[in-house]
Image (cartoon, rainbow, N blue to C red):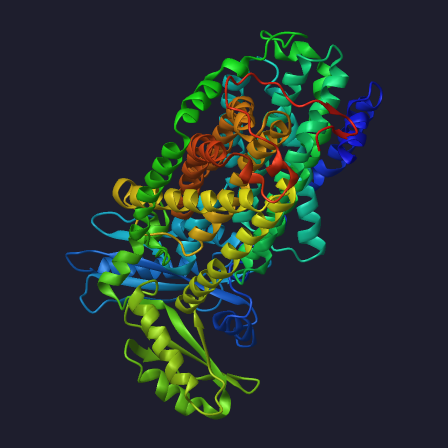
Amino acid sequence: MATGVLARFVCGRRTKWVVLALWILILAVTGPLAGKLSGAERNDNASWLPGDAEATQVAELQKQFLPTEIVPAFVVYERTSGITDADKATAAADAQAIGGVSGVTGEVTGPIPSEDGQALQTIVPIEIDSEGWDQIAGVVDEIKAEVGTGENGLAVYVTGPAGNAADSAAAFEGIDGTLLYTTLAIVTIILLITYRSPVLWLLPIISAGAALITAQAVIYLLAEYNGLVVNAQSAGILTVLVFGAGTDYALLLVARYREELRRHTDRHEAMMFALHRAGPAIIASAATVAIGMSCLMLAEVNSTSGLGPVAAIGVVVALCAMMSLLPALLVIGGRWLFWPVRPAFGSAEPTATGLWARMGARIARRPRIVWIGTALALAVMALGLFQLNANGLSQQDSFTTEQPSAAGQEVLARHFPAGEGQPVVVISNAAQASPVRQAFAATPGITAVSEPVERNGLVQLEGTLQAAADSEEAEDTVRAVRTAVHAVPDADAKVGGMTAMVMDINEANKHDNRLIIPLVLLVVLAILGVLLRAVVAPLILIATVVLSFAAALGVSALVFRHVFGFAGEDTAFPLFVFVFLVALGIDYNIFLMTRVREEAWQHGTRRGALIGLAATGGVITSAGLVLAGTFAALGSLPLVAFAEIGFAVAFGVLLDTLVVRSVLVTALNLDLGRWMWWPSKLARVPDEPPGETPVSPAPATLTGQAAD
């Protein structure tokens, strides 16, 4: 078998050094490339938009009217007792100074007084250069340095699209470093607790680090030379995914290696058996995650479709590292790596009488009551789904902390038309400019429409929204505008702008939810069917996955609303949580059920279920803690969408490992027995009474399992 050949090469007395040398060479080549990944990220609008959406088409057509993309910043001055002549002079001087800031282009408009006499606003056009939106933060910082924060009762804010972009850039600034160090700290602590060794924890960390560097290099090359869309979101998730999934694979392999060290005097032979017996489960798990993540490539939203290959590459590289570099390091180091609790040859296997062995014995007394009760409890938790509000987040609700631009936007909305500065953009054929403009201006919710600007047979119009650009009222207005201008014959009118972009992204996310969630379920079902060679077991396991996902989402929705006080969830939230929970959570199904299947040939399914739980319960729990901890690290970012994904996935993984896999699936195995494997040959192997649960694995050779 392939795993036997791999095991011999990776663990050979001489070839283990070849493996180590190869990885050192790989890191020498990929290290410099990995450092360039952040420079290849695309964080502009195009990287987040649906490819064929109407707002995306408008953004492309707008390039004919402006040679470069312009994003406005608004400098807002407020004195609630009334603006003074001195305030007007200060704002005028600031406007003149702002005009000299690098990155500010065209005419700085203002200061413009509000009708209530309590505020002034200055509109500052900022050019987006080749660096994209990343450079806006620097320009906004220079503007803030020029205008200050106000004094003597005059408050000054910088807001608008450019101010929002600067706050977002600040939130994403250092995302790679923040996530990396937070993830490292969490994984290190959990591995120290798991292994209780001052040395062993280093090897999974080193292997995961090597995998991350290599994956970043591969992704950089694809982004730079093959058009792969990578942004701060996918780059940040890559870090979490590689460390989370990679450490999971490491935990399973090390647990099996430690088990084999008690049966073999030679550590090379022990690792060969460990790789041969744990390898198929690890490979199947990684393949499931990679294929599941690849389904994201079918998404309409560019950022989501780009995340698919990024995540898949990360998982595949993590698998390669954990199946080659980690085993080589373990056999090079020897048994002393496990000090102070070294697994001596012939010593007793502690899992035979451990926590999970005792838990299995209790479940075995009344398995049907256990699985029905557990399923009902999960169903009750899923009722929280009625609190889920995955309809998108406004700019103000997108951060976990108050942002300067959000405060400025509130001031702007108090004294000026709420939608000013983020207009609705209509582009149509120039011949129909007049009727299009009339239809546009007559739409309720539009307070003013600009004069048409003509280029290359097209005309551009801009309309001011009465409502705030990120409000539901503004979205309703944009829908009405689309209905009105689309009805103009031969105009071929298209409606875009910031509000339309958000609308189209949300609609595309909802489409992606409907398409990709069922597709991932089918992919996972097919892989489980091939791996377990059965029909009943995969169907039951998929049912537990769906129930676990619903329960995690239900509890998360309640926590977001009543504990954290979040206003809602991003429209992509259900899809991301589903893909991560199902694709990654299926690891634990595979780890458990492949071991149960292995033992069932020797002892029958019911006793095999208890042996499998005793042998894998500890490692599955540790793996779940690591994965939950790494995703919880997303909460270190001041972004609501990341915090919500991090919490939901972390909670879902813990629910999966501590309850669903260990209790619900084990109880179902005990209740259904050999019928779990119908229609395979294993369904005809008689069940032994559960009895005692010493871990006594079925005999195996490096060329295949004797019983199968």
Q: Position of residue 657 (x, y in %)?
A: 47, 32
Which quadrant holds residue 705?
Answer: top right
**Left or right position of 192 against 205:** left
Q: Is residue 155 above or below residue 453?
A: above
**Left or right position of 500 against 690:** left
Image quarter of the N terminus: top right
Q: Position of residue 687 (x, y in %)?
A: 55, 29
Residue lying at 76% horizontally and 12% vertically, measured from the top left: 266
- Nearest to the observer: residue 409 or residue 354: 354
Q: Position of residue 576 (x, y in %)?
A: 48, 49
Q: Position of residue 598 (x, y in %)?
A: 63, 30
Q: Is residue 255 above or below residue 471?
A: above
Image quarter of the C terminus: top right
- Nearest to the observer: residue 245 or residue 699: 699
Residue lying at 41% horizontally and 84% vertically, measured from the top left: 485
**Left or right position of 7 against 436:** right
- Nearest to the observer: residue 43 or residue 189: 189
- Nearest to the observer: residue 618 or residue 319: 618
Q: Is residue 634 above or below residue 448?
A: above
**Left or right position of 56 against 32:** left
